[in-house]
Image (tube, grey):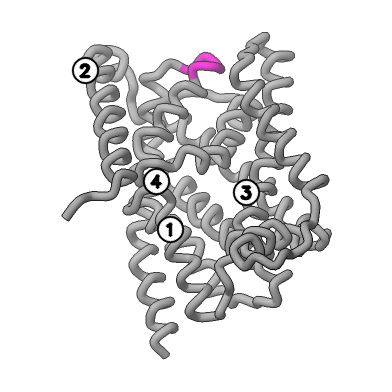
Amino acid sequence: MKLPVKQILSVLILIVLLGFFAYYIYHHASDFGQVRLVNPILIFPIVIISLLIALTNGLIIKYLVEPFDLKLRFKEWFGLSVITTFYNTILPFRGGLLAKAAYLKKKHSFPFTGFIAMMAGVYVINFLVAGFLGLVSLLFIYLFYRIFNPLVLMIFGSVFLVSVFIALFSPKLPETGNSFFNKIIKVANGWHLIKDNRKIILASSSVVVVQILLAVFSTTFMYNIFGVDISFIKALFLASISPLLVLVGITPAGLGINEAIAVFSAMVIGIIPAQSLSVAILSRIIGTAVIFILGPIFSYLLLKRERK
């Protein structure tokens, strides 16, 4: 049986990145030798924050399906948040989204066009908030530390401006006589069901802000575990990058890619790769442990619910 091209590409990219990290660690063993677990007790609040972030992900799902006349119970919106992350972890190319779409379709007859519109809403709100907070963090990093990186500024600026344009100026299109084009038009127009509901937009945006603030505390604790002090504004910069990682979700859960971006981002604000890579690896271990406990549980609960 032939493997899909995307799966082969995912595996190859993962192998290259892991090889690069292994090479770097081998040739910079002395740097990693100086990294020590100073405050391992902070792992416990990080686990709690991971659960809270999963909860906020679920709230965003709950709010964004309401304009489609769909009311989800706690077990569903929290469970969908968990299994989405779980299947994204074990499958490449955001496989968790397919699991979530399949559940909503079978359980609630939620059309795929509506699901795409909902996900468009998720991405627009995430990118809008993350882009804005990223730009704010860059401004204060320049004012306080005189650190400026044009590439990062261009990334945050582009994400923010494109998100603003989509949120404010995306036109509502009339349907045509072609069924294929009508499906695409329904997806585009589905955003307007969310866009015109200010209550949903405000609630979802507030949840994303809370999410990023939780990520700020998690980042701060993570570096403090290794005895590295990091300011709030630097942690905000690193946390604002996290929502943008969905753009590069090629490998399962972004394995290797997320770590590479984390190392590059930390270098921008003066954190050495040995420290940032250690933090990224520990974060990966904690996140994977949490989701591998909850993922099978909620997969069973939702599937059992479906059988009933």
Left/right placement of residue 134 relative to residue 44 reads: right
- Can the viewer see residue 60 in this picture? no
Looking at the rendered structure, the secondary structure element under dot 2 is: helix
Which residue position is annotated with label 3?
123
Coordinates of residue 212 in the picture (x, y in percent)? 62, 43
- The reply to whether the C-beta atoms of the residues labelled 4 and 3 are less than 8 Å apart is no
- Identify the residue at image location x=51%, y=23%: 265
Three-letter code for the amino acid on which mark 4 is drawn: Ala
- Identify the residue at image location x=78%, y=48%: 170
- Can the viewer see residue 255 in this picture? yes
Left/right placement of residue 121 relative to residue 278 reads: right
**Disc 1 residue crowd, few under 14, some 14–19, many 20+, Cα 10 Å:** many
Q: Nearer the viewer, residue 90 or 24?
A: 90
- Identify the residue at image location x=73%, y=69%: 67
Labels 3 and 1: the sequence-earlier one: 1
Which residue position is annotated with label 1?
96
Numbered tag placed on residue 253 in the rendering: 4
